Amino acid sequence: MPWLPDAASPGESSLPALPALPAGETARSIELGERTVAYVLRRASRRTIGLTIDHRGLRVGAPRRASLREVESMLLQHGQWISEKLDEWSTRRAPEVLQISDGLQLPVLGRPLRIRLALGANRCLWNLQATEPTLTLCLRAPTEAARMLEKALREKARELFAERLTHYAPLLGVTLPRLSLSSARTRWGSCSLRSGIHLNWRLIHFPPTVIDYVVAHELAHLREMNHSPRFWAILAGLYPDYRAARQELKRLATTCPHW
């Protein structure tokens, strides 16, 4: 898929000192207009240059073969977007990190879900038909709670996403693509003619209308790998109410649970 700004953003013309970085990552800075922007450059096995902006600042993923000139040309090309998103993040609160405890309530498909903890052999029991829908995590140890909760939600997400892709692909006249789950913090979906569609499992927290918008959006990229007027026309034919769902996704993105 062509490079697109990842769906997040923070800010400051001068960012706080960065902690020690993992191998393969380098702290750099660049002049974008009248501001100096710090960023972390990460070399990886990828085909395109990608920009991510979140509470940590600007992070750039680049193919190992890409020159620094190519990387900084991309940053200069998208300088206005980078500045705007950094400014947005400067006014945001850092996302709250949830503690997984008995009785915790999380949104799933846009509705409250009560999390219950019990002793067991690391199994997950859903009860979505009850007056108060619940997910019971049967744990060998309390330390397994976060991992088992993510496992349960990932499985539910994969099942639902596969069903929605099966619904929309024939409407668009495309072959059902391969589905992979993503855990990216700042991108809800991506599409590649080679590797298929990647959907963020955390979409499971959002209402079905929003999930359908992201599914339809990524499928539309199989017909048009950009965000040209033709792309939006294809999406409108597949999911007419995409504008409202897109705005709702932006609103909900700021409330998405993390643990």
Image (tube, grey):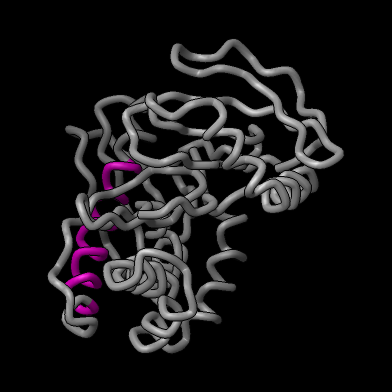
Does the stretch in magenta take in 217? no
Between 182 and 28, the one lying in front of the other is 28
Which span of residues is magenta-colored? 149-168
218 on left or right of 161 = right
Q: Position of residue 49 (x, y in %)?
A: 46, 39
Residue plotted at (40% across, 41% down): 48
The percent coordinates of residue 239 (x first, y second) are 38, 84
Residue 163 visible within the image: yes
The quarter of the picture where residue 11 lies is: top right
Q: Residue at x 43, y 59 (%)?
A: 205
From the image, give the main secondary structure of the stretch colored magenta.
helix
Q: Work out whether 13 lies above or below 224.
A: above
| Residue 122 or residue 12, whichever sits in front | 12
68 or 157, nearer to the observer:
68
Corner quadrant of residue 247 = bottom right
In the depicted structure, whether residue 43 falls above or below residue 120: above
Tell me if residue 36 comes above or below residue 154 in the rendering.
Answer: above
Q: Report if residue 129 is visible in the image.
A: no
Find residue 40 and report its horizontal and vertical position in percent: 59, 25
Instruction: Please state the horizontal and vertical placement of residue 105, each as a whole percent of the image.
Output: 49, 54
